[in-house]
Image (cartoon, rainbow, N blue to C red):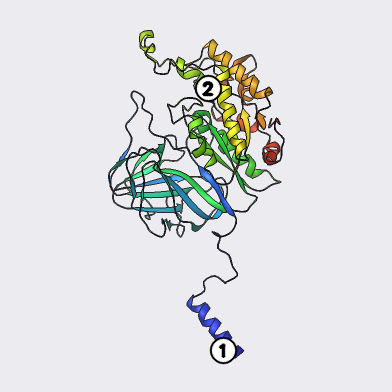
Amino acid sequence: MRSTSLKFAAVVCATGIFAIPATAQSPCQAGHWVTAWSTAVHTPVAFPGAPPPLTLNNQTVREVIRPTISGNCVRIRLSNEFGATPLLIGDAHVSLTNADGGLVPGSDRPLTFDGKGAVVISAGAPMLTDPVDLNIPAFANVAISLYIPKQIAASTFHQLGQQPTLVSGPGDFTGVPHLANATETHAWYFLSDLEVRASAQTSAIVTLGDSITDGFGGKPGEYQDWPDLLADRLAQSSGSSPIAIDNEGIGGNRILYDGAGVSALARFDRDVLGKPGVTAIILLEGINDIGWPNMKPPGVTHDTMRKNPFADQVVTPDALILGMKQIIERAHAHGLKIFGATITPYEKAGYFTTEGEAVREAVNEWIRTGQAFDGVIDFDAAVRDPQHPNRFRDDLQAGDYLHPNAAGYKAMAAAINLDRLRAASVSSPGGSAR
């Protein structure tokens, strides 16, 4: 009898009826979901001279992203949250990419939606794919390929991507290793998050901000922004479980008013609370609230600037502080810790005024001393010129005295105390991450 049982077991294994022993657990069953990569979606900025949204029709879009933690089971969050009409995804794949941009052999996985390869995403809604087994190392390049069979404007996107996005000619090429004769853009379309199943100790930190968080001024593809450099530092340090850094910066974004993306107050639920595995936030925002009412684009006259659509949106220190307090309260209500980053200097920038500088200084003083945040990161001190504290150091700015260059972003990332950041879940309010 025992011999017969062994023979039966051998046949079962040989035929592959039981590919996984009954006691084994799929990577997609263990742990919890953590957002390993994320971007803040928004609608194209409606500024004079801005290009119209990309229109797609019977084309494949291949977008390359870089998660900051590893995982063996992944799912993708797509987004039509700024679309006015339903979005049809005809096919979708996830793959690793190699140095020449091609798909790594054996890594391509079709993505499904409740078991189906196509899906309609309602206007104003996101959509999660089914989980798929795929071993993704931390900081590996991952390609998300989407086939868009019917004409639609890409009204939900993120303008500043790190790697080139490829747009094919007519056809579904989602599983093709190389997209031949594709055009390139540097935006991400209909793509919001990559999530992985991870251990209970693995978590994520959201960096909520504007272009200085988004990485404007750094070289695309080299991940010179301070959130990516922070992720590098965390990965190279020891002493705790992995922490993903999710960059929710939008160039031009403001705390109190819409314009370049909806305001931080309006997008907080989607871009922070809606991300699984998040335990903490770093908030760096406010310079555009101060500066936009005083924008002076090159070549315009004083009379033209009287028509500045943001001129009546001048902010006071109290208004900005109230906005930050609202974000703090909403974070704490959901059990998240939040670090406040001081607003970086901007004298000599295009929209600088002495009145605005007084607002910046007052808000920074409150951030440092108000004990409302769970910790403080002094980015202002990290990049300012000691001889001219109202402006960037010359060697740390990108040429406009508003955005850091690669060295400036490195100085910002280095200003963050990793031990205090890691201990955010147990630290007491009013601490410092300096």
Residue 222 visible somewhere in the drawing: no
Q: Residues within 10 Å of mark 2 (few under 14, many from 20)?
A: many
Query: Which residue is more in the foreground, 5 or 275?
Result: 275
Tell me the number on the disc at residue 4: 1
**Quadrant in which residue 204 is drawn:** top right
Q: Residues within 10 Å of mark 1 (few under 14, many from 20)?
A: few
* Image coords of residue 386 (percent x, y): 65, 17
Tell me the number on the disc at residue 287: 2
Q: Amino acid at mark 1?
A: Thr
* Image coords of residue 112 (percent x, y): 41, 57
Tell me the number on the disc at residue 225: none
Q: Quadrant of the C terminus?
A: top right
Q: Quadrant of the N terminus?
A: bottom right
> At x 67% / y 32%, what residue is drawn?
374
* Image coords of residue 259 (percent x, y): 42, 26
Residue 384 visible somewhere in the drawing: yes
Image vertical order of residue 259 relative to residue 195, above or below? above
**In the rendered structure, which disc, 1 or 2, sits on the residue that comes first in sequence?**
1
Disc 1 secondary structure class: helix
**Quadrant in which residue 334 is drawn:** top right
> At x 44% / y 27%, what residue is drawn?
258
Disc 2 secondary structure class: helix
